[in-house]
Image (cartoon, rainbow, N blue to C red):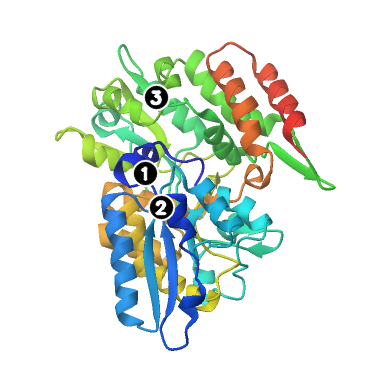
Amino acid sequence: MLPIRFRRLAAAAAVAVVGVGALAACGSGGDDEASSGPVKLRFLSLAWQKESLQANKDLVAKWNSEHPDIQVEYVQGDWNSVHDQLLTSFEGGDAPDIVHYEASSIGEFSKQGYLADLKDLIPADLKGQIDQGVWDTTTFDGQVTGVPFLLESQVVIANKKLLDAAGVTVPAADAGWTWDEFQANAQKLTKSGQYGVAWALKSPTNRVLNLALNYDGKFFYTDGGKTEVKIGDAEKEIPKRIHDMLYTSKTASPEALGMSGADTLPGFFAGKYAMLPGSVSLRQQMVEQAPKDFEWVTLPPVKGLSANQAANPQTLSISADSKHKEQAAQFLSFFLNPTNMATLAKGDWLVPTGKQANEELVKLTEGKQGWDVAANSAADLTVAPFQQADGYPEWKTKYATPALQQYFANKITLDQLAAQLVDGGKQVLR
């Protein structure tokens, strides 16, 4: 999943924080290995939404009832503190057997040898359900250290009544607009007191680098073991198009620049913006918060040379120190079978990585509430170069985000933006 989504910020209020001591107890200790008793596994889950939380617990209970010789203990984790807690437990040799996290964060633990290589543990049917480009997000130095199972794509949420009034036809789930069409339709939807689009760009870096794959914009280039930031026409395409919507066609609301996705909802419901580019998970807020008479639709990802986007899936890993790796892998195969993966995705309003799980999810939901669009978007999600760059988090925080904020505020030129991004790369990449 790209960076932690805005809705995770509420996780601390929804889930009790797991203390370091609790995680330290997650390992498979010597007592668990008594031949007279069942194998005991600890599963650290980061599920926090009500439906997702219940689905996770139900699946663990079902497994335990069907496998008396392999018992799984559910341990509740928290997105806001899990990184430091895991680091402590890994270093102390008492990590959970099974760890729920995300692809962009497990690389560090993988390179330090804390996660098991799953290549020979995961069955062929599960491997075949997930595209190689998604597997690549959890592959580090030739080792697969996580099973990707939930994805987050970027789609467009639109006000159906405003689209109809402007004569804009909703595209089919597998026929997203090109960027030119998107910009032209934004123009049709712009009039006095109404903008065609609200780009929520409070944290713009991941959004820009994600969408840059539409034009094969890589930003990070590695040659001879050295990685550097390069900005060419491909990398400039998405920033320039968004900037043009703000200041040339003036079809995008400037007030949304400092907003998160959730911040734009009041204005969207009031008809100030016709379209909201954002996470596929934004559909949950639409279902829960939209006025009863508000008609909304989910539009497919916008396309450039392709509809490719960066995939940052949620993952399940097995600790390298677990004494029961094969049994842990058996549990993962059960937990992520197509039906269960579809259930988990529905509970979290995300996209399952498995092809059959996607099909089952569409059947389960009848494609309503944008589930058809969400499921179809999985095919275009793949690994991006920035996800493999060790210095990316520092570059994003110190250089890219401030520079992009300045550019979208019209305070620097596109060439100045490029120079700042390149210079920042020289400071942090190794």
Q: Quadrant of the C terminus?
A: top right
What residue is shown at x 34% (from left), y 31% (from top)?
A: 262
Give me the disc on residue 198. Answer: 3
Image side of residue 198 versus residue 291, left or right: right
Please indicate, yes or no, whether residue 150 appears anywhere in the rendered image.
no
Give me the disc on residue 415. Answer: none
CB within 8 Å, label 1 to label 2: no
Q: Residue furthest bottom?
A: 36
419 relative to 58, above or below:
above
Give me the disc on residue 77. Answer: 2
CA–CA distance in space, label 3 to label 2: 34 Å
CB within 8 Å, label 3 to label 2: no
Secondary structure under the numbered disc 2 in the rendered image: loop
Closer to the chain start, of discs 3 and 2, is 2
What residue is shown at x 36% (from left), y 53% (from top)?
A: 47
Secondary structure under the numbered disc 1 in the rendered image: loop
Quadrant of the rendered image containing residue 277: top left
> In terms of depth relative to the viewer, which is nearer, 53 or 217?
53
Closer to the chain start, of discs 1 and 2, is 2
CA–CA distance in space, label 1 to label 2: 21 Å
Residue on which disc 1 sits: 281
Type of the residue with mark 3: Ala
Residue 4, image x, y percentages? 46, 41
What residue is shown at x 26% (from left), y 38% (from top)?
A: 286
Residue 256, image x, y percentages? 40, 20
Number of residues whose C-alpha sits closer than 10 Å to that of mark 3, classed few (under 14), some (14–19) or many (20 or more): many
What residue is shown at x 75% (from left), y 41% (from top)?
A: 221
Please indicate, yes or no, whether residue 79 appears anywhere in the rendered image.
yes
CA–CA distance in space, label 3 to label 1: 17 Å
> In terms of depth relative to the viewer, which is nearer, 203 or 212?
203
Type of the residue with mark 1: Ser
